[in-house]
Image (cartoon, rainbow, N blue to C red):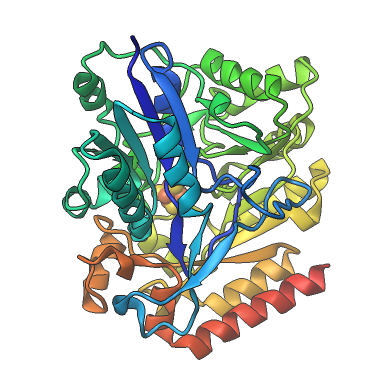
Amino acid sequence: MKPRILLVNPPIYDFAAYDFWLKPYGLLRVGGRLTRHAELVLFDFMDRLVSDVPDPRSDSYGRGRFPEQRLAKPSSLRDIPRYWRRFGRNRDVFQTVLREQGPFDAVLIQTTLTYWYPGIVEVIENIRAICGSVPIVMGGVYATLCPDHAAGLGADLVIQANRTAALWDWFGIPEPPPAPPFWQGYDRLGCGVITLTKGCPFSCSYCASELLCGSFKTRPLEDCIRDLNQMIALGIQDIAFYDDALLYKPEQALIPFLHYVIDHKIHVRFHTPNALHGRFLSAELAQWMVRGGFKTFYLGYESRSEQWQQVTGDKVRTDEIAGAVEHLRSAGADPHNIVAYQIIGHPDSDIQQIEASMHFAHHLGMRIMLADFSPIPGTPDGDRCNTWIDMSEPLNHNKTAFPIRLFGADTVNRFKDLCRKMNASIG
Ligand code: SF4
């Protein structure tokens, strides 16, 4: 008989969270590869389209608010003047699944942001209370970046980055061939996720891409098309790319993929929540993207300061962003959906010229989304933050907390107000 395995995407404990095409993609991909070897049950605390979530409203592209409850702040974040919340489905729904759909032979837990570990603590507490000593495995971003901390949460196995071989060994099975993600674990899906590539050719000083993904590579086109077709068969209309460098070497990945989409008259809406590289967004590529169904364009443009750009990794320059915006507009992209991600609270804020950078992006007609800086352990910029905070406590990596600690709440509020006004003036 096949083992019965529970896959869990934990709830989020944070000051803020929003369903910006958020799916536990790593867990679903592992699940997809296990389907031949195991009977799988998925419990995604962040699934909004289930009957136990009241009012699961989404915008026209599938984004929406998570259910939330206000809670007392943890002691290490008491100085942050924001409300602390738990986002996601209620704990008792999970407890019912553990009681009624068990017993399970193993539980796999997805981990993401390091400072979201309280959600994992909650999940493990419930599993241990109801399922006793069932083996628990966790993998993902937090497990990779904070392995020692993760080891203290009570899982039986903590798997880092791409070391999935440890998982297959642990299950005692040969490495399963690539397979589509386990989307069939959901009753209903508003959006899906895909990647065409892995990794990034840059090494920005604030980013963990290299630690998590290694060097840049493309996925086989036939695997990407298989994943796309599976989502289409499930009726998914909005698909987010989780690539770190979707536009790099487009002749090897994005262009052949869009060729297929256009040739086969596939009509879905593509989105880019992970920042796009303005440097690679040529006039030709913009045409391909718009023709292929891309609807939202989030461009990484953290600063207009050349000095800041150079110091942090030189991923994009100002003239390149201006060119990318121009190419997108000429190709017919909706200007309201061309957005600049701009980092706020970076340790080198003194040379970043954040306000001037916001004005410049606004002048180009871009919407602005301020990306609060989170110090990521193991990155040069994250490790420098030991000067301000205790990096050994992952709650201190919280992206709402760090900019407030660096600038003060009044300054952060002023930047956010300015951002709101600029975006409102675009309409
Ligand atoms: S370009 Fe983007 S994904 Fe690549 S290292 Fe820099 S921030 Fe990370």
Which residue is located at x 23 percent, y 52 percent?
146
Residue 392 vs 183, above or below: the answer is: below
Is residue 397 or residue 53 the one in the foreground? Answer: 53
Q: Please identify the quarter of the rendering in which residue 35 is found.
A: top left
Quarter holding the C terminus? bottom right
Residue 199 appears anywhere in the view: no
Which residue is located at x 62 percent, y 73 percent?
358
Is residue 100 or residue 40 the one in the foreground? Answer: 100
Which residue is located at x 70 percent, y 64 percent?
367
Residue 15 vs 187, above or below: the answer is: below
Residue 217 appears anywhere in the view: yes
Residue 147 vs 400, above or below: the answer is: above
Which residue is located at x 40 percent, y 61 percent?
310
Q: What is the x, y in percent for residue 229?
A: 65, 18
Q: What is the x, y in percent for residue 228?
A: 62, 22
Q: Please identify the quarter of the rendering in which residue 211 is found.
A: top left
Quarter holding the N terminus? top left
Q: What is the x, y in percent for residue 63?
A: 67, 50
**Residue most extreme to the front:** 100
Q: What is the x, y in percent for residue 164?
A: 28, 27
Could you tell whether 162 is left or right of 345 in the image?
Answer: left
Is residue 321 or residue 382 the one in the foreground? Answer: 382
